[in-house]
Image: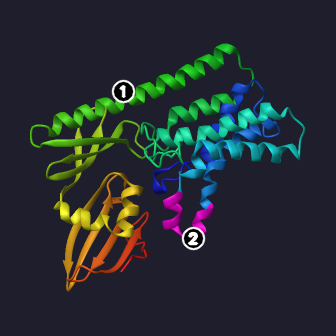
């Protein structure tokens, strides 16, 4: 049900969540029921921004979880989907519109609950909202969806227990995140001057949390086990000089990368007659490597020779046009 690529839920998973949410309407959950159908389609619809992929991963990732995931677009998508359904079956328009919008909204809400975030309030702000407490594949959310979809006779008590369980679980996951941050802070505070600690849910492991610690001199990346409190450090990057980071940020790919991820590290290399700046998105570590990278190549006079965005793997090169 879950696609690991890029650290985000796939549309099918969102659709299943939407289908489960439609059970709260009181109507039977069925793909022949316009409420269920509208809610499920609505829950998948914000990923319509995938059409940007025809212009490549660079354009797609630049716009993903942006305007199509915002409140104005969610309302528009709900209206379009409801009107579309009305051509095939008769129903109470406002009722189906409401549940279709709830489905649309669920997509953005669950994106915010995992570690990627979404721009719910765009165009009023370009900042992503992110709570970062749910994994890509969450067994508790999956179980609740199965119960809501397949239990035929649902009482008020059933709905109440399901809803309360969901919110208690979110509270539990948030408490886990807070405790994981405390473990990491205690582990590093004696040896480093800590500036910031970012805690993210592990891609798949329920009891583990990924961390990025920013100190005055290092970026420390690793994973903490919530159960036994053990800290595993994956990578330790010495921070470059501020001038190096500013040099990268002044490029087109640097501006994009800074917007793409708030947590990245820049490495300076020299090869033959070139100066190379490589940037690493520190959030997603998969199969012994970080997922997203960017590269800028300069000559000895610090003129840009070429630049690349590397989505999903360092070997995938997408050229980025730079101002010469």
Q: Position of residue 92 (x, y in %)?
A: 85, 32
Q: Compared to 258, does 213 lie above or below?
A: above
Q: Callout 1: helix, strand or loop?
A: helix
User: Considering only vertical position in the picture, is 284 above or below 162?
Assistant: below
Query: Where residue 114 sits: x, y (%)?
Result: 46, 42
Q: Nearer the viewer, residue 139 or 84?
A: 84
Residue wearing tag 1: 175
- Specify the principal SS of the magenta part: helix
Image quadrant containing the C terminus? bottom left
Residue 174 falls within the magenta-colored stretch: no
Residue at left offset 57%, top offset 70%? 55
Q: Which residues are magenta?
A: 51-63
x, y (%) of residue 14? Answer: 61, 43
Please state if 241 lies on the left or on the right of 31 as rendered: left
User: Is residue 34 positioned above or below 77 on the image?
Assistant: above
Residue 62 shown in magenta: yes
Q: Position of residue 16 (x, y in %)?
A: 65, 41
């Amino acid at each position: 049900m879950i696609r690991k690529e890029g650290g985000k839920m796939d549309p099918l998973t969102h659709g299943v969540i939407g289908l489960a949410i439609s059970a709260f309407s009181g109507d039977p959950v069925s793909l022949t029921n316009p409420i269920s159908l509208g809610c499920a389609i609505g829950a998948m619809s914000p990923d319509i921004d995938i059409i940007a992929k025809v212009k490549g991963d660079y354009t797609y990732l630049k716009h993903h979880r942006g305007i199509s995931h915002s409140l104005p677009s969610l309302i528009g998508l709900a209206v379009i989907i409801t009107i579309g359904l009305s051509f095939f079956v008769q129903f109470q328009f406002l009722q189906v519109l409401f549940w279709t919008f709830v489905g649309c909204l669920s997509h953005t809400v669950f994106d915010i609950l995992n570690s990627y975030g979404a721009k719910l309030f765009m165009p009023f702000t370009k900042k992503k909202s992110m709570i970062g407490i749910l994994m890509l594949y969450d067994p508790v959310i999956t179980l609740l969806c199965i119960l809501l979809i397949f239990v035929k006779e649902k009482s008020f008590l059933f709905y109440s227990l399901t809803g309360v369980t969901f919110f208690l679980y979110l509270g539990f996951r948030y408490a886990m995140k807070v405790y994981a941050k405390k473990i990491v802070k205690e582990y590093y505070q004696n040896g480093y001057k800590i500036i910031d600690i970012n805690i993210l849910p592990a891609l798949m492991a329920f009891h583990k949390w990924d961390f990025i610690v920013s100190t005055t001199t290092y970026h420390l990346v690793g994973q903490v086990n919530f159960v036994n409190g053990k800290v595993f450090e994956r990578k330790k990057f010495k921070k470059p000089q501020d001038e190096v980071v500013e040099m990268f940020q002044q490029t087109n790919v640097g501006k994009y990368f800074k917007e793409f991820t708030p947590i990245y590290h820049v490495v300076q290399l020299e090869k033959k007659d070139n100066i190379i700046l490589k940037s690493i998105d520190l959030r997603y570590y998969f199969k012994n490597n970080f997922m997203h990278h960017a590269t800028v190549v300069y000559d000895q006079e610090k003129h840009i020779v070429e630049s690349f965005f590397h989505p999903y793997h360092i070997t995938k090169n997408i050229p980025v046009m730079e101002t010469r």
